[in-house]
Image (tube, grey):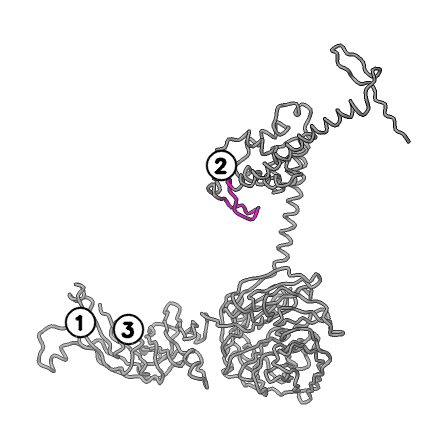
Amino acid sequence: MHLITASVDTRIRIFDLSSASARSGASAKPQAVLEGHVSVPRGLDVTRDGKWLVSGGRDSVVLVWDMSPKEETAAKKSGKAKGKERDATPVLVQTIPILERVEAVGILRADDDGVAGAPSGARKFQVYTAGEKGVVKVWDVKTAKILFTLGQEQEDIDEEQEELRQITHAIYVPTTSTIVSIHGDQNILFHSLSTRSLTRQLIGYNDEIVDSTYLSPYQSTSLSSPKRSDTHVALATNSSLIRVYSTSSLDARLLSGHSEIVLCLDRSANGGILVSGSKDRSARIWSPLQPKDENAASSIPEWRCVAICEGHAESIGAIAMSRKADSDTNADQDGLRFMFTGSQDRTIKMWDLSSVSLTIPSDTDKTPVIKCKSLATHIAHDKDINSLDVAPNDKLLVSGSQDRTAKVWEIDYVYSGSKTVRGEIRLVGTCKGHKRGVWSARFGRTERVLATGSADKTVKLWNLDDFTCVKTFEGHTNSVLRVDFLNAGLQVVSSGSDGLVKLWNVREEVCVATMDNHEDKVWALAVSSDERSIVSGAADSVVTFWEDCTEEQEVEKENKRTEMVLKEQDFLNYISLNDYRNAILLALAMEQPGRLLNLFRNLSSLSTPSVLHAPSITGNASVDEVLRTLAGSDLTRLLRYVRVWNANAKTSSVAQKVLHAIVKLRAAEDVMKAFTDDTLVTGPRDQDQGGSTALRELIESLIPYTERHLVRMEKLVQESYVVDHLLGEMDDGMFGLNEDDEMEVEDGDLIPLSVDVMVEA
């Protein structure tokens, strides 16, 4: 058994792990030291039979070593043979120039059916290399030639981007015939050797997310729902690469083409085309490759740039496509019409997309990129343009800017063939009212309204007939960065710098839901075509998918309401049957102290005469028995209700009656145990009351009010004697009793027969 290591001194050392020094734990000396690299070796691999060793390093070469020569050959030459035959120093047999820094190297199995190279019948000896250029190359060792390349080499990129895209490590998985490459930008790519394509990609770090949009690259095969479904989501991050995720498997693809950070994204009317704007002052149109078969539609497609728009003098920060697909524009039913871009140069450009081809065969290696023609250019605002949106009927355009205004433009687009295309925009209104810059503007899908979000922490709704503000939504604690409509315009969703996503009811002007899953500015917000889900992305690199659960909540509320109605009916039935045990237990289970209060208050009227004459504390012997046998959890809940009742003078009599019954009927140990079952006497959690309660706290809250009620009752008793005294004085003095009005009784008592009161008119 041997151990092979590579060191920063450019040497490769071979250790014999079966030697006596290695087994004893002492410092072992290498059996052989290989010198051949002039830079750090980064990869080592040995064939399964142990005869060949390959090494690759940052000196841009791969060295092939023969591990099979015997020491006797070297001994014969030196004349020092001693009859022992041991492994000698491996011999360098071949040097393969790679022309890039090598970070990983490995040997492919000769029986791997996915590896193509040597002619049929010849022995395969192939290695793979990965490194500086961000691609995996498969080499034929015998001819020192590249057989094929996995991945695409990027041209015209700066040193920083090259460092991020380089491969830092690569792993060969023979069981699946796959090579897994780990890149400097924390992405993991799975390359299939059989199909020579990218099968899966995992993105380890998204960086700051600045925009997002849903995509529908494939036509639905369902007869019940022939429309496209949103199966992917595109993200623009603090990078020149666009990330496209599958919403089901979270598999991802990176779209390269921009040379600077991508700032904005949008999609076509059917969601099948993606457009992007970047700091490199250009906009690009992306189209998916058509799958070869129907099964390919279930995987993530490969996207190609089909057109580019250049002409702005500054970064493009806003982009919007036409919302209608024109069948006359292109041979494809989903032909493109036009697109708008807004830039930091304060201009809006209108682009003709009628000549863009949307059908890309899957066997096309390179897609021709056309340059779109600008139809119109307007200086629209006094400051940077942050947002653009096109109305659903393609008649209006809105632009939001840092100059605190949102402007509405009328779109004039005429298509009369590929050679006759005319487009123009005309200002029709300005929405003024925000105190700070407008970050987002969106048209309503069903009503003639416009929603804007601003740095003044508000969302405003505007009437497109007279461009006046009709509603203002306040609730964010920082700038509102994105807004959009939901549920046919009945709701508005917004995201802000406070890391919150809020859902607003348009009619009532109230926030109905606040969704919190971000720790930084929520720059990206997109709504799916069916308005059933929302995706939000923030500066904290987190992407959150929100699903509309309104229907489920309504069903749950209806079920709870139905259950409550049934329980209330059961409660009334128990009362009518004088089944106080089940009535009290049900009221405690429903958490309805009001029903319990009425039950205890009306015991005298509900009870039968025989029950009333029975000795009891509460006025009903069966109720006394219920209080004596209550379970611990029910007892603690009832005592908390008593505490609330005792704090009110109107209900204090009922509270004192129930409390007196509990004290008389239950031992102190039972009450303490009821609280101890949850937690110790210092505090079980009482979520119903919204805080921590304990037996000690309960008693401390009962004593002051009880003492106050006692003082009040004593005062009432004293005042009752004053009334008796006044009545006695009135009988003896004011009216006077005549002898004729008295009659003698056997025991000598005098009973007044009548009292005549003279009232003068």
Indicate whether residue 616 is drawn in magenta. no
Q: Identify the secondary structure beneath mark 2.
A: helix
Toward which corner of the image does residue 488 lie, by quadrant?
Answer: bottom right
Q: Position of residue 492 (x, y in %)?
A: 65, 66
**Residue found 65% across the figure and 25% down from its top:** 611
The reply to whether the C-beta atoms of the residues labelled 3 and 2 are less than 8 Å apart is no
What segment is highlighted magenta in the picture? 683-696
539 up-or-down from 621: above or below: below
Residue at the extreme front of the image, as rendered: 733
Q: Position of residue 211 (x, y in %)?
A: 56, 73
Q: Identify the secondary structure beneath mark 3.
A: loop
Instruction: Kindly report the distance in space between the C-alpha atoms of the residues bearing marks 3 and 1.
Output: 24 Å
Residue at the extreme top of the image, as rendered: 746
Mark nearest the camera among 3 and 1 is 1
Asked whether the viewer can see residue 428, the reply is yes
**Residue found 66% across the figure and 46% down from its top:** 562
